Image (cartoon, coloured by chain):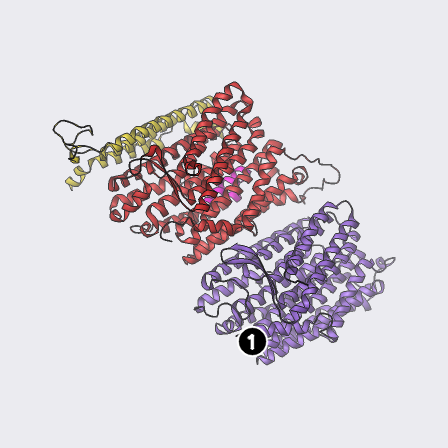
Amino acid sequence: MIGSEIPALIPVTYVLFAILIPLIGLWKREIVWHLSLLGTGITSFLSAWGFLHLINTGETIRYYFGGWTPPIGIEFVYDGLAAFIVLVINTIAFLVLIHSKEISKLEFPGKKMPYYTITMLMMLGFNGMVLTGDLFNLYVFLEISSLSSYALIAIGEKRAPYASFRYLIIGTVGGSLYLLGVGFLYTVTGTLNIIDMHAMLPQVIGHSSVVAALILMVIGVGVKAALFPLHGWLPDSYTFASSSSSALIAPIGTKVAAYILFRVLLFLFGVDLIDDQLPVTTIIGIFAGIGILYGSIMAIAQSEMKKMLAYSSVSQIGYIIMGISLANPFGFIGAVLHVLNHALMKALLFLVSGSLRSKEGHSLITKFNNSYRKKYPWTMAAFTTAAISMVGLPPLAGFFSKWYLALGTIENSNWILLAVILISSLLNAVYFFRILEKVYLNDPEEESTEDTEIIENNEVGFTMMFPMAVMALGLLVVGIFNAYIVNIIFTMFPAGF
Amino acid sequence: MELTYVPLYAVLVSLAAVPFILLSSKKPNLREFWTILAGVIKFLLVLTLLPSALQGNVIELELLEIAPNIPLVLKADTFGVFFALIASGLWIFTSFYSIGYMRGHKEKKQTRYFASFAVCLSSTIGIAFSGNLLTFIIFYEMLTLATYPLVIHSESKKAIAAGRKYLSYTLTAGLLLIAAAGITYSLTGTLEFRPGGIFGDTNLTSTMAVTIFLLFLGGVGVKAGIMPLHSWLPSAMAAPTPVSSLLHAVAVVKSGVFGVIRVVGFIFGPDVMAQFGLNDILMVLAGFTIIVASLLAFAQDNLKRRLAYSTVGHLSYIVLGVALLTETGLVGSIMHISFHATMKITLFFCAGAIMVNLHKKNISDLNGIAKVMPWTMAAFTIGSMGLAGIPPVNGFVSKWYLAAGALEGGMLVPVIIFVVSGLLNVGYFFPIIHRAYFKKGGPELEGHTEASPFMVVPLFGTAVLSILFGLNPDLFFNFFDMASSVASTIFNSI
Amino acid sequence: MLDFFMGHYAYWFTMILLSVGLYGMLLKKNLVKKTIGLSIFQAGVILFFVSVAMKEGATVPVKADGLPVSEVANYMNALPHTLMLTAIVVGVATLGVAYALLIKIYNRYGTLNEEELLDKIQ
């Protein structure tokens, strides 16, 4: 039955296409885009299939590579959470790659083949990170995805290589710290398998190595997830990378890193052990809260749309990590739902900025004006949808993740974090309505040009519009039918809830 | 006839009109036809719910589960039907009036205007029929968003500033409401609107109760214009007058007081309110607002701003009536929702008609206009009399019950507040009437006649309604019966 | 006290390597030197893994004469070493990407000194 092979098939597909694209690209350059779509399309299909299969059977698939059973062999664990994240990231990648057709012509015309090859490698890394059940294997996939994303970020503006280099230094340190943490855990447990280690940890929890390992792993993964104050690499990288690269990395990269935090904190250590030696969740919660406010405030201060979105990512990642740190069912639901919502919203917003760059040549907020409303009515409608969802107004998706997160903070009687969620929603409103005002309203300082000058509709083409429209509709659908998704999330709970 | 789905249709009908309105943006007549058609259908749909509401039946429609254990519920109980009836009924008047006003004023972007208006009405009816707090919040936030394009309609600097102020107040309010709902949910495990409250079995500490109540009050109090949360309302007068008339005298602000009553009567319940002294908080704030708003109204020369402050004051009548926690007081409050609506909408219509016809915004310029616009000023006089509580206009009836409710609770201060504020109402309205009738008009009035019938008919219509309801509060829609039945379900629920 | 230091000398050695690496990455202005710092940092982690798998008096896990397989204590755990092979490969790849980026940066700005670079970017 192919259903049980899916955890292996998804990464294998990416490996296959990472080889196929350069080979065929040498012969026929113009079809690399189609190939990359085929690749992500297949994996999206597989992950959707696997997800449905999992919901129907309710059985976690543990795929043993080479037939070696853990703890000797490496296994892929395809449980509800992994299946969900895999589905989200592959679908988002598929949509973003559709959009990349025009962007690739404009922003990196000669580099299509390497771009799509690296994309496949990066997606391989991300999927591997999500699926693997082995801590060291996870490190390898982490580095595969990181190295690919350094390269992807470097394909961008003039300043991109420097931004990418800084990310490389910080990111590699993060990765090494994670590895060091794994080493500490290995010395006391003698296993690298997450499920196996989870079973052994209660016996060694008091050991100082375990505490050290936990701190190192959280810091290491925190760098990748851009958890405040480890977010320094993020704004420049997202800003100077090509529009399609940031649209890929922003929604997927940090989410996967946040997923690793899920795994490490809630599945590996578990709710019972996590705070045994140190109030880890409280500390993470504090940093997440500061990050949420800091990101929102910095976003308000930006005049470049991509940079604003980058800072907004810092803030939104804070939501997810806060949800994890609450370590209660509502926080978990909110965090998982926000992974989906934020992936949709951020991808959509970066796609909008990419579309604007392709048409206007810039995405400077100060230069936005109300002719955009006439020129790009649908793009702007998509932007508005995403903006309203970011602010968290019902019935769009963003409201509901905030709702569950708020319930989570209330359950822990953590009033400060509740206030943080609410205040940050207002700050979000400030930076998004600022743009909406510019786009939809006449500038009162200037004479109205509308009557004298006829502005032609200059909407972006189908390949750009389609993914944006799908995501905007997705936000509405996820919002209205979030109860269905939440009921599925109920089945993903780690032990102890 | 099967009534189960009627609340849903009533919510959706104006939403369904939006695409038609947008598509016919090039043909104004067709566009306005859709608006009016939607308005009439909506009103008729709500009207079909009236008989069952009068019998005290509750029509409940569970649409889907929006969050685990929290369904999206439309519930047409008596109170909901009551509010929906007013909002949808007055929308028809406003639609006709809008046509006259917008064309007379040669406003731009009329399509956006009519479309947003339709969304606003959907949200308002949604608020009226919300069966639980989460549904309420969803429609409440929709209303916030849909009103924004109307507030900034003129896109002048002032309007945009007003829009920002409006959003910052209402969005904050929405968030407080979400926080309050979250805490309530974690304490009670439900968010349903239940007559007599849902906190009954919960062990509440005093701090907790006060905190939750203040969060709720912050949430619904902004739209209800309770001081110090009122200041968006006078600024929002930058919107076109029909918007001020329907939204800032009926739909939006009444959603706020509707929310106050839902919170007091259906979430906390009179017993919990009294147990923790929450009604005292409400009473002090409302009493303060009534007096201060009436005094501030004196200081306004701009007619619409004066009406806005008067609205702030009258909203607090309703809130004060709720805070009395007596059945009669609540009846007065609920009736004042509808009666203040007919009176205030009349006054706003008049202000708009004067503005379009004579281009006058300030009270000091209104000398002698009654000669030019006799119908308008007659309606204005009726509305003012009503707000001051002079019979036979309907304002007298609701005030009577409010005062009786205060006496029933053995409270004298509220009665004094009602009387003083009635006098203040006289004080700030009658100079306007005096100017219009007894002062000599300037030369610029020559050549002007009464405003377009599109405006005069609706404004006179609402004035006549005010008198009719004053003579017989149960006329047509049995407002009095509905109000008493709502009050008795809340107070006799245990 | 001395025992504590001596007993954990491998840990101290790792700590020193990590600190040297961090120092290079944070304080050196030349981007190549930063990269060298990064390498030292990674080497620290790798040596840590190798050192924890070290066992006094044990030999490589290949069956030797006179050492029965049942006496596990005679053999070292080879897993950390093999893992580090992969980690070394990752480190090499990282260096490769880093140098590719440095070449790009040098081509665009003509310098690898961070201060000069930041001046030119502004």
Whether residue A477 sits left or right of residue B345 in the image: it is left
Indicate whether residue B269 is drawn in magenta.
no
Q: Nearer the viewer, residue A129 or B114?
A: A129
Indicate whether residue A308 is drawn in magenta.
yes
In the orientation shown, which residue stands out farthest toward the left? Answer: C66
The chain containing the residue under callout 1 comes to B
Does the magenta stretch mainly form a helix, a strand or a loop? helix
- Which chain is drawn using yellow? C
Q: Residue at x 34, y 49 (%)?
A: A270
Q: Residue at x 31, y 31 (%)?
A: C42
Secondary structure beneath disc 1? loop
Q: Residue at x 59, y 34 (%)?
A: A464
Q: Which residues are magenta?
A: A297-317
Q: Check the image and report above or below for A170 versus A483.
A: above
How crowded pointer 1 is (Cα within 10 Å; few <14, some 14-19, many 20+) is rated as few
Rendering colour (chain B) = purple
Q: Label 1 belongs to which residue? A: B492
Residue B191 percent location from the top left of the image: 52, 62
Q: Check the image and report above or below for B295 versus A344.
A: below
Residue type highlighted by circle 1? Asn
Q: Check the image and report above or below for A408 versus A73.
A: below
Q: Is residue B213 visible?
A: yes
Residue A52 percent location from the top left of the image: 48, 43
In the orientation shown, which residue stands out farthest toward the top? Answer: A27
In the orientation shown, which residue stands out farthest toward the front? Answer: A1
